[in-house]
Every structure is written in structure tokens, then in C-alpha cells.
Image (spheres, helix red, strand yellow):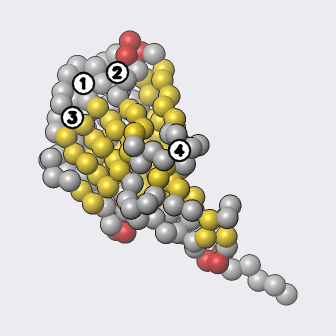
Amino acid sequence: MNELILSKLEVASGKGSITNLKAVQGTDIADSTDALAMDDTYLNKVTFSLLDGAAKTVTLPTFSNVGDKVIIVLAADLVASGVLTIDCAGSQSFDTGSYYSYEGASGVEKIDRATSGETQLVATGAGTNSGAGIGSVVEFLYVGNDKILVSGRGRALGTGSDAWAFAS
């Protein structure tokens, strides 16, 4: 009888092993301007961002196993001059099915979708109204072939703002 070995499964033409997902807390993203290069210890964990008024770049770990993910939850409102730039590692980029929805300026619902070749998701804070409030969440899921599928939802602070955008 043939056995299906999940660790050898090829998913959607993307090679890599299937990962056991676990919802445990990773290391927090500090409220500082120091860049953070995530490593494998951030994979398959929930990471909380404490960033509020500083500008910071967080580089995702290099994904290799289909199903690996990184989840980032804002544990502080991104305000004033706060900018959180989340960048892909190496040759990886966001899948064109990626999206981020949020409450934009004046409470209008918005969605931003990734286009081919985009490698950054940028959240920009605002003094009193931000679309990057506490509880905003983004998930980065590796789907193979150097593509990361992004899905997320921003929570408003005040009446919101056009806070989230994909970029190259």
C-alpha cells in the first residue's frame, strides 16, 4: 500500500514540508527604531508589536516549508510618526492574492491588495486617528515558490486613517 508522507507533500507546485502549527507567543517587537531581522524562532508563533511612535523595519524570516507562518498583532496603537515596515527576506515576495483590510479615514472601510513583486507591507501611524490600532493583525503564510500569502485586518483608533499599504 502506498503511504502519503506529509513531509514530502508538494502543494500547488511549491516544494517544502508541511509544518505543525502552534499558537504560542514569540518574542515581542520592541518599541524602538532598531531594525529586527526575524529568524526561524518567529515561525509558527504569534508575535506582538509594542511599536507606537517610532519607525521600524521588521524583516520576515526566510520561509522554506509550505504552511509556515508568522502572525503579528499590534499590542500598541501606531501613532504620530510611528511607521512599521514589514519586509520579505531575500528573493521572497507577496502572493498576488494577498490583502489587508482596515478602517480608513472617516471610518470608510478600505482594502489594499498586493501586486506582483511587492515585498513590503507598511503601516503608518497618525496623531489622533489611525488605521493601525491595538488588535490589528496580519498573517504571513508561506505557500511555496518564494511566495507569501498575506491576510490581515486593521483596527481603527479614532476615525481611522489610510494606514496600510503594500509596496516594493
Quarter of the picture holding the C terminus: top left
Q: Residue at x 42, y 38 (%)?
A: 166
Say whether disc 1 or disc 3 marks the residue closer to the N-terminus. Answer: 3
Residues at marks 1 and 3, CA–CA distance in whole angstroms: 7 Å
Q: Nearer the viewer, mark 4 or mark 3?
A: 4
> Looking at the image, which is closer to me, 89 or 36?
89
Say whether disc 2 or disc 1 marks the residue closer to the N-terminus. Answer: 1
Residues at marks 2 and 4, CA–CA distance in whole angstroms: 25 Å
Q: Residue at x 17, y 35 (%)?
A: 53
Q: Which residue is labeled 2 in the image?
A: 161
Secondary structure under badge 4? loop
Q: Where does the image place residue 163, in percent across and percent down from the top left?
A: 35, 28
**Image height check: is 122 above or below 15?**
above
Residues at marks 4 and 3, CA–CA distance in whole angstroms: 27 Å
Q: Where does the image place residue 118, in percent across and percent down from the top left?
A: 45, 45
Mark 3, Cα crowd under 10 Å, few <14 / some 14-19 / many 20+, is many
Identify the disc placed on residue 126.
1
Say whether disc 2 or disc 4 marks the residue closer to the N-terminus. Answer: 4
Tell me the amino acid under the disc marked 3. Answer: Gly
Identify the disc placed on residue 116.
4
Say whether disc 4 or disc 3 marks the residue closer to the N-terminus. Answer: 3
Q: Which residue is labeled 3 in the image?
A: 82
Instruction: Please report contact status of discs 2 and 4: CB closer than 8 Å, yes or no.
Output: no
Tell me the amino acid under the disc marked 1. Answer: Ala
